[in-house]
Image (cartoon, rainbow, N blue to C red):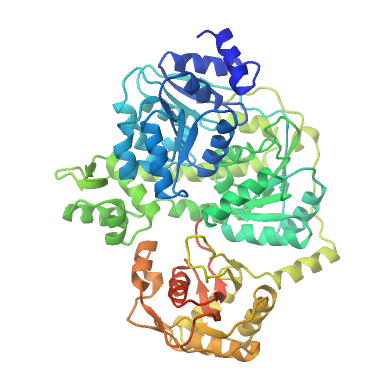
């Protein structure tokens, strides 16, 4: 098919008049059955480079993509054009995924999206050999490289499939963000004969600026004023999940419609938020990096970062969500050098310690295990286990095998000693990337040119639109009125406990905390009382928790207050619940008890062990059917304890269980 014929078909199916030259260059290579790495800016139309050939080929194009939101977005678009497309993901039921796989095996799906992590699923392992694959696409291919800004171990294992493909089946890897080092890594893994094209990265509709701020109060003051003045909708990126809640609540208090988005929100609510963003229900989505690659909304008018990202590659990826329709977009970074503490913590905890690698090796020396069993035997997080498995596979210390319908890992006796030294080089690189990000923020060079050159697009011209090119600078001034509003906000901000889920107990409602554990002295006060014989929780904590109840949870009638039975802190929570009972004038019940001994939840690092620790551990002596309960605890962390109690009360036909705690942990997850 020549270009003229292809563009006629393009117009008929996709309603576009013509291809960009580089789009056609890539598509032409795909038609020749080649392997191709295409690096091009966001919003350019990289997806068309595989969607068009997929429609022309016989069989199914399998697209490995990192985020479910991105899959849903593209599948909806393709279906609207009459193209048979679907995605396999963990948010769908097993029956839905099975039906989609069956349709793919029967050749009824042109484009099938799937996450790389799905390779571990036994059903996929069986199905992939039966799907008539026409081409393979590795989207966001920078995730392949350990030198990339968003390395995902499962991406490495994609090449197990690629190596099994017949030589004539094309493989296309695409990304908007890859330094020369990352590009070389991807290119080498694609194999001999691969083609590599890098496009221009400049975004001519971006108005970029960096605003130096001296405090969190300055950030709050500036944000409310700025977002009120903006036309259209945008994204506000924050460093942690806790910060997203703080900023969203502050914007709401300033009559700006805003909502929180991060990986800790359940799948149903994330999907609803994504839909609401597309429909402009909110002025601003306040998100962690979880929204970075997962949303294709063409008319976002502003992207603001309240905390500088870990690297300029991260930054370019996230600001790339803005202005995809070519219209002007405001790109602002609120910069404080002290914010590097968060990045340093991330760097230091990004890879498990050597001790954790040895735990996995020792476990596999005893017997071959799958991922879940490794988590149970080592007490490591899922992300830690996946990282360790990928590294041990790379160093040929273990091997993956199929046992029945499960992928398990075997230790290779006689394997070399695990080499941890290479990861120190990666760690140092991450520190250099952080310093490069800070240099960008403090630079007096054209912002767009600086970013492009850093990403190895040697743009020579300055943009003429950024704060450096225009010679404009801005300072934040906090008026007395605004400072009073900020102070009032800090004294009345009570974090939500999101527990409602279609898959969870129907009686369990969302709750509230009086504060974040690490955002004040409250965490240290609780720790002293629980673990240092510091006495009862203070009257201040009681009053703060009462205020949280009155503001967030007083909309329904409660029959009783109940409290989480202790593991090691005696009557501390019980006495706190008694004090709240008197203040709130809600009768207390001591009927919630443990039926067996349990360990403190904090000793377990993954959700499987936390659930096993508490499974069927609680009983309730009293009447629960049709009644509403206010559940009291001191700290909310994973939520496993409260969900298990909710499951108990659901079985007893309770009407409502709603938690109220002193503090919600911040956690180390940036997503």
Residue at left 38%, top 57%?
A: 381
Q: Decide if residue 72 is on the left or right side of residue 557.
A: left
Whether residue 536 appears in this view of the structure is no
Residue 629: percent from the left, percent from the top? 55, 80
Q: Can you say whether 413 is above or below 181 in the image? A: below
* Foreground pick, 169 / 601: 169
Query: Is residue 519 left or right of 639 when viewed as pictured?
Result: right
Above or below — where is 341 with respect to 525? above
Is 514 drawn above or below residue 39 in the view shown?
below
Asked where in the image residue 184 lies, by quadrant, the reply is top left
Q: Is residue 489 at all visible to an observer of this figure?
A: yes
For image coordinates 32% across by 58% down, the residue present is 375
Instruction: Kindly give the residue lying farthest to the left in the view shown.
Output: 414
Q: Residue 442 or 615: which is nearer the viewer?
A: 615
- Horizontal and vertical percent for residue 393? 28, 41
Q: Nearer the viewer, residue 622 or 299?
A: 622
Residue 247, horizontal then vertical, whole percent: 68, 58
* Label total for image: 0
Q: Nearer the viewer, residue 594 or 548?
A: 594
- Name which quarter of the figure residue 449 lies in: top right
Residue positioned 69% across, 44% down in the render? 279
* Left or right relative to 67: residue 582: right
């Amino acid at each position: 098919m020549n270009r003229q014929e292809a563009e006629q078909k393009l117009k008929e199916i996709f309603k576009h008049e013509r291809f960009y030259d580089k789009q056609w260059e890539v598509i032409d290579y795909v038609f020749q059955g080649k392997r191709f790495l295409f690096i091009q800016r966001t919003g350019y139309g990289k997806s068309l480079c595989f969607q068009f050939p997929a429609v022309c080929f016989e069989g199914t194009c399998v697209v490995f993509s990192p985020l479910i939101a991105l899959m849903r977005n593209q599948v909806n678009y393709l279906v609207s054009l009459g193209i048979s497309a679907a995605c396999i993901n963990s948010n769908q039921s097993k029956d839905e995924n099975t039906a989609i796989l069956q349709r793919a095996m029967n050749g009824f799906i042109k484009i099938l999206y799937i996450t790389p992590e799905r390779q571990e699923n036994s059903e996929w392992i069986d199905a992939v050999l039966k799907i008539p694959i026409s081409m393979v696409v590795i989207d966001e291919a920078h995730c392949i490289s350990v030198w990339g800004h968003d390395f995902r171990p499962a991406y490495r294992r994609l090449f197990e499939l690629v190596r099994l493909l017949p030589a004539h089946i094309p493989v296309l890897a695409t990304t908007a963000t890859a330094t020369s080092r990352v590009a070389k890594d991807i290119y080498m893994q694609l194999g001999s004969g691969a083609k590599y094209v890098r496009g221009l990265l400049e975004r001519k509709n971006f108005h970029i600026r960096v605003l130096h701020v001296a405090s969190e109060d300055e950030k709050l003051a500036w944000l409310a004023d700025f977002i009120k003045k903006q036309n259209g909708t945008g994204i506000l990126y924050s460093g942690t999940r806790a910060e997203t809640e703080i900023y969203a609540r502050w914007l709401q208090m300033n009559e700006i419609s805003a909502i929180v988005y991060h990986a800790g929100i359940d799948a149903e609510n994330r999907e609803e938020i994504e839909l609401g963003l597309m429909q402009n229900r909110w002025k601003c989505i306040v998100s962690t990096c979880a929204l970075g690659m997962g949303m294709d909304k063409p008319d976002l008018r502003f992207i603001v970062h309240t905390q500088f990202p870990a690297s300029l590659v991260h930054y370019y990826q996230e600001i790339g969500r803005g202005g995809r329709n070519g219209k002007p977009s405001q790109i602002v970074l609120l910069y404080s050098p002290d914010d590097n503490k968060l990045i340093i913590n991330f760097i230091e905890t990004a890879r498990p310690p050597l001790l954790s690698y040895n735990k996995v090796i020792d476990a596999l020396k005893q017997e071959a295990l799958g991922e879940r069993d490794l988590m149970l035997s080592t007490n490591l997080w899922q992300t830690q286990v996946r990282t360790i498995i990928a590294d041990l596979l790379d160093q040929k210390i273990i091997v993956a095998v199929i046992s029945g319908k499960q992928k398990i890992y075997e230790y290779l006796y006689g394997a070399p000693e695990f080499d941890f030294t290479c990861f120190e080089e990666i760690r140092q690189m991450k520190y250099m990337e952080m310093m490069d990000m800070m240099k960008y923020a403090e630079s007096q060079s054209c912002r767009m040119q600086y970013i492009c050159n850093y990403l190895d697009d040697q743009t020579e011209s300055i943009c003429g639109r950024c704060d450096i090119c225009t010679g404009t600078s801005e300072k934040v001034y906090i008026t007395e009125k605004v400072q009073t509003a900020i102070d009032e906000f800090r004294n009345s901000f009570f974090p939500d406990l999101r527990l409602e889920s279609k898959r969870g107990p129907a009686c369990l409602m969302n709750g509230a905390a009086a504060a974040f554990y690490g955002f004040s002295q409250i965490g240290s006060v609780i720790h002293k009382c629980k673990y240092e014989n510091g006495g009862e929780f203070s009257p201040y904590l009681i009053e703060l928790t009462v205020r949280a109840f009155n503001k967030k949870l007083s909309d329904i009638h409660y029959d009783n207050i109940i409290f989480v039975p202790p593991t090691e802190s005696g009557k501390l929570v019980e006495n706190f619940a008694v004090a709240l009972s008197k203040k709130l004038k809600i009768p207390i019940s001591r009927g919630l008890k443990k039926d067996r001994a349990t360990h403190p939840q904090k000793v377990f690092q993954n959700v499987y062990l936390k659930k096993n620790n508490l499974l069927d551990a609680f009983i309730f002596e009293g009447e629960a059917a049709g009644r509403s309960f206010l559940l009291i605890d001191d700290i909310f962390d994973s939520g496993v304890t409260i969900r298990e109690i909710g499951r108990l009360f659901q079985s007893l036909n309770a009407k409502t269980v709603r938690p109220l705690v002193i503090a919600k942990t911040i956690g180390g997850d940036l997503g």
